[in-house]
Image (cartoon, grey):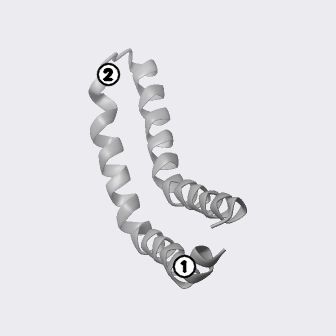
């Protein structure tokens, strides 16, 4: 396995990680921002207030995007398995 192949696999894996985690991170960020604006307006300074809404938001996001995430991971795994002989040869 050459250095170029390793770099290509790592680049694809990192891109996949960013791509499939982006929906959950964005939902968590938006919910956190909304809750902190509400906390600022109402002067409630409870640090644990964002936990449950974020948890529910991420759960709903996983339910909505789960099939796409799984298809992306399976596609990457299939790419690795199909090209395994080429990776081992070079």
- Residue at 57%, 59% in the rendered image: 19
Vertical placement of residue 56 versus 73, above or below: above
Name the foreground residue: 69 vs 29.
69
Residue visible at 66% across and 74% down in the picture: 90
Is the Cβ of the residue at disc 2 closer than 8 Å to that at disc 1? no
Residue 57 in the image: above or below residue 1: above
Q: Please, what secondary structure does the residue beneath circle 2 have?
A: helix
Q: How crowded is mark 2: few (under 14 residues within 10 Å), some or many (20 or more)?
A: few
Category of crowding for the residue at label 1, using alpha-carbon neighbours closer than 10 angstroms: few (below 14), some (14–19), many (at least 20): few
Q: Is residue 23 left or right of residue 2?
A: left
Report x, y in % for residue 87.
60, 74
Residue 18 got which mark? none
- In percent of the image, x 62 and y 67: which residue is there? 1
**In the foreground, 3 or 21:** 3
Numbered circle sitting on residue 84: 1
Which x, y percent locates residue 66? 40, 69
The image quarter in which residue 60 lies = bottom left
Residue identifier under label 2: 47
**Element on which disc 1 rests:** helix
The picture places residue 84, in percent across and down from the top left corner, at 54, 79
């Amino acid at each position: 396995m050459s250095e170029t192949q390793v770099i290509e696999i790592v680049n694809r894996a990192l891109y996949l990680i960013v791509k499939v985690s982006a929906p959950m991170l964005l939902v968590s960020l938006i919910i956190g921002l909304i809750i902190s604006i509400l906390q600022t307006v109402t002067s409630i300074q409870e640090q644990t207030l964002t936990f449950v809404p974020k948890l529910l938001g991420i759960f709903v996001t996983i339910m909505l995007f789960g099939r796409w995430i799984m298809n992306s991971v399976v596609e990457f795994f299939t790419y690795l398995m199909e090209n395994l002989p080429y990776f081992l040869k070079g």
